[in-house]
Image (tube, coloured by chain):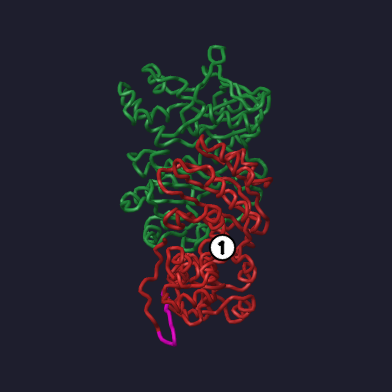
Chain colours: A green, B red
């Protein structure tokens, strides 16, 4: 692990304990990590960064930001059917950032490293005149040649999603003061979904065994379905009425939230995948929800509700 | 590869061509990369970030910044005896950054990807209110169990360096208007060393075969020797009179540059390694320079000149 000179004590005090005794990290006394090949497995690699004011709020507690950072990356891995392994960490601290904030960040990493059996291998620390920026390059293992892609959807496939859509988007709006009439329990549920997504590592194996295409929903259901449709060169049809929503989300809809906001919001970190009919049954038995199907096409997403096609204005997600 | 929605066209237009046809990148249409295990080899991993105003100047051309970013990471790999393989790229663009700048950056990546046979596998693009931040997590292959560490120095070892020390530091000062009396050729040499370091991939194999400890010099010769001394729990003795300097650096010294600035400056990206007497001979035959030796100790660096120990005030490097 490397860092500006002023950062060496931060590395020693905060990050070396996170590397623990894993051989890959070389105790963080070296400036590289060394990953042995696991016979029969490919290494699945993903990079996701979070910027203060864009991907998280300045008021979000830094231990939870750390955990979200890990979870966002772990979510990517498990959606590919990969077993989370470890990560390289980049921290760009704003100049003058207090040690306490860095310590809270490291404490959050510790919690979710243990939770997901996910090790720190190395990284870099720098300082910046700009906002806090955090990035992870995460590694997982998948059986050789089997890591799922968003390019694997086939005409005739069913489209499935791992769990509730829209909670994180609504949680962000709760943090901004909207939906004040919601119950405290519902508000807490939505804020928790925003701050601390739950990677579906419990579903990685069944998805690996049955899905044709798979990814996690980070930019919003519609935007990510569009990525899958384009990569697979098909049309994905989503039945809005079948998209699973939480009781808290339904309460927010009753208070005026637009259901299309839920599917264009982001930060869900649910698995989105396709499978043939038999695979879809196995996936549903594991708890996934069928929300549509896959037709011949050239990279479109079609949303239906009440049996009719509806237009979604904003298919993208413009972060915080 | 992933990115903010506004960045998808940048990914399509600038980064997809950089991923080319390598299987690992999945054409950048997926959100993960997949690296097959190479039998008999470990994967060596390093992360190095560069921040505008800290690690490079706002006036540095972005194609050269891109090339330096790749070279800094490749330098880390080859110092460990690893064969450069490919990388994950994180770009945090300042809001409103012109497309032309991004295109220049991508063009620089293309040049050095080809130069070093180094492929883009994936990454993330985000935007920030802060300065431009660029980070790479780089991968290389080393024979199983043989990747060199900075913790391997043994008492009695010779200390060697791959080439000129101090040029990059002086180049930065030339860019800031110092040493105006230098010849244009000398100024160009020093600025080139700062902007476009030369990773010593030509030395990776001989270093792998003969060195006990190895790393590249990025924070300055003294600071990095100190890292090696601490990791190896030895004392490294550096004979200042034997540290190789370029004709341009000697001209700058004649104009008043302090020789200790050269060894406390940074950005050299030369290999620093130790080896036993026979190994040192092989390394010197390959062009490395013997600059000192390794004594029993507990993590110190001792600098001698004219046979006497000299005190170096500032052992660290406080970037740009």
- Please state which of residues A168 and A276 is positioned toward the viewer in this rendering: A168
Q: Residue at x 61, y 74 (%)?
A: B210
Above or below — where is B252 with respect to B73? below
Q: Is residue A10 left or right of residue A77?
A: left
Q: Position of residue B97 (x, y in %)?
A: 47, 43
Magenta stretch: dominant secondary structure: strand
**Count of all numbered marks drawn on residues in the image:** 1
- Please state which of residues B37 and A239 is positioned toward the viewer in this rendering: A239
Work out whether residue A231 can be spotted: yes
Residue A121 magenta: no
Quadrant location, the C terminus of chain A: top left
Q: Residue at x 58, y 21 (%)?
A: A302
Q: Position of residue A243 (x, y in %)?
A: 51, 22
Q: Position of residue B40 (x, y in %)?
A: 67, 59
Q: Residue at x 56, y 19 (%)?
A: A303
Work out whether residue B214 can be spotted: no
Above or below — where is B198 with respect to A15? below
Q: Residues within 10 Å of mark 1 (few under 14, many from 20)?
A: many
Residue A17 location, quadrant:
bottom left
Q: Residue furthest bottom?
A: B307
Q: Residue at x 32, y 23 (%)?
A: A183
Which segment did they paint magenta? Answer: B299-308
What chain letter is assigned to the residue under label 1?
Answer: B
Q: Is residue A88 left or right of residue A150?
A: left
- Please state which of residues A50 and B151 is positioned toward the viewer in this rendering: A50
Residue identified by numbered label 1: B75
């Amino acid at each position: 692990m490397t860092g500006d000179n002023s950062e060496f004590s931060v590395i020693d005090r905060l990050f070396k304990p996170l590397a623990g005794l894993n051989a890959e990290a070389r105790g963080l006394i070296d400036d590289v990590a060394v990953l042995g090949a696991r016979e029969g497995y490919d290494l699945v690699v993903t990079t996701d960064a979070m910027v203060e004011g864009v991907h998280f709020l300045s008021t979000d507690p830094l231990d939870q930001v750390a955990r979200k950072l890990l979870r966002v990356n772990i979510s990517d891995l498990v959606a590919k059917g990969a077993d989370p392994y470890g990560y390289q960490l980049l921290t760009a601290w704003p100049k003058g950032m207090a040690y306490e904030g860095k310590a809270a960040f490291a404490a959050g990493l510790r919690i979710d490293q243990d939770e997901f059996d996910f090790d720190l291998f190395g990284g870099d620390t720098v300082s910046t005149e700009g906002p806090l920026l955090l990035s992870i390059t995460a590694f997982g293992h998948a059986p050789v040649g089997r890591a799922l892609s968003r390019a694997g959807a086939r005409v005739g496939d069913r489209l499935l999603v791992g769990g509730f859509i829209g909670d994180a988007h609504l949680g962000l709006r709760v943090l901004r003061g909207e939906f004040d009439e919601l119950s405290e329990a519902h508000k807490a549920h939505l804020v928790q979904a925003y701050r601390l997504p739950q990677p579906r590592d419990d579903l990685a194996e069944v998805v690996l065994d049955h899905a044709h295409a798979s990814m996690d929903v980070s930019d919003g259901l519609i935007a990510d379905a569009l990525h899958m449709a384009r990569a697979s060169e098909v049309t994905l049809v989503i039945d809005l009425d079948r998209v699973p929503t939480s009781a808290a989300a339904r309460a927010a809809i009753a208070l005026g939230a637009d259901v299309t906001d839920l599917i264009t919001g982001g930060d869900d970190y649910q698995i989105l995948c396709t499978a043939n009919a038999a695979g879809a049954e196995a996936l549903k038995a594991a708890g996934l929800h069928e929300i549509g199907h896959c037709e011949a096409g050239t990279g479109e997403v079609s949303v239906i509700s009440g049996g009719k096609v509806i237009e979604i204005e904003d298919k993208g997600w413009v972060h915080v």
